[in-house]
Image (cartoon, rainbow, N blue to C red):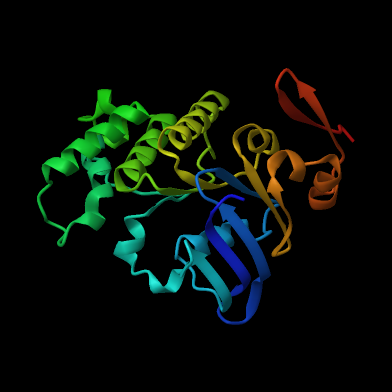
Amino acid sequence: MLESAFEIKNTVFGYDKKVEIIHGINASIPKGEITALIGPNGCGKTTTFGILSKTFKPWSGDVLFYGKQLVEYDRKEYAKRVSVVHQYNTVPDDMTVKNLVAVGRTPYHNTLFSHESQDDKKIIAEAMEFTGVAEFADRQVKELSGGQMQRVWLSLALAQSRETLLLDEITTYLDIRYQYEILNLIRQLNETFKTTVIMVLHDINQTMQFSDNTIIMKNGNIVCQGRTEDVITESSIKDTYGIDAEIKTVGESKICLFSKK
């Protein structure tokens, strides 16, 4: 049995202490694998992502990271182990790629204006090389395409921590070529560094192709979880999304075809 990176136990959360959004969910996220969070809009997957990234504090229940309560980690300690790439990110247009990636080393410094160490410089360079952004390290971020920019955010995350990566809809707004470039890069990162990856996705076929495990949510509940090939079925798609689908095997992969009705 695989070791769990995260364990979510009877977790409840809502906004303004009035409207409950997450209804006592339970989940185990394996170490060293890619886990996808999927479900229809408003199902609670982004909120669950926010709990894992320490953006939100649950009303009740337990969220554990390697057996320790998430609330017991201070932000700097947690940031050294968990990198987060949100769906929406802002940065000054005149910042260079290299300087933005260097932000990933912030948790390792005592002050905001600490100088980069030789280790910092080495890790930043390696992160940019791995994600394919080293060639435009001195360019300003405003000059980059959407796909290039997502590689930069991944580079920043990698410079921060190779242990655990949380990704919120990282392929949103990218054309199909860049979507698959990013997803292949995430898989490569996972295989190279044994990085635990949790990513919120919308596309079922991309989930089937790139995730080892899948958690399906609906109406603030987890309706099923486990190995992706076991969890994503014609029945679970119908129950979760209310649409008919057919899953076929093409070569070594499975694809989901949706009804035209």
Q: Percent x, y for residue 28?
A: 61, 58
Asked whether, in this view, residue 250 is left or right of residue 54, the answer is right
- Along the viewing direction, whichever of 171 and 224 lies nearer the viewer: 224
- In the picture, residue 131 is in which quadrant? top left
Q: Residue furthest left?
A: 115
Residue at x-position 69% and y-position 49%: 226
Q: Quadrant of the C terminus?
A: top right
Asked whether, in this view, residue 139 is left or right of residue 190, the answer is left
Residue at x-position 20% and y-position 30%: 138
Image position of 193 with respect to 17: above or below:
above
Q: Residue furthest top?
A: 251
Image position of 129 with respect to 38: above or below:
above
Q: Percent x, y for residue 230?
A: 76, 42
- Along the viewing direction, whichever of 188 and 94 lies nearer the viewer: 188
Asked whether, in this view, residue 112 is left or right of residue 244, the answer is left
- Along the viewing direction, whichever of 103 and 80 lies nearer the viewer: 80
Q: Residue furthest front?
A: 1
Asked whether, in this view, residue 185 is left or right of residue 120, the answer is right
Residue at x-position 12% and y-position 45%: 117
- In the picture, residue 257 is in which quadrant? top right
Q: Residue furthest right?
A: 261
Image position of 173 with respect to 10: above or below:
above
Residue at x-position 26% and y-position 23%: 135
Image position of 67 with respect to 95: above or below:
below
Q: Is residue 96 visible?
A: no
Q: How many marks?
A: 0
Q: Percent x, y for residue 67?
A: 48, 66
Q: Is residue 33 visible?
A: yes
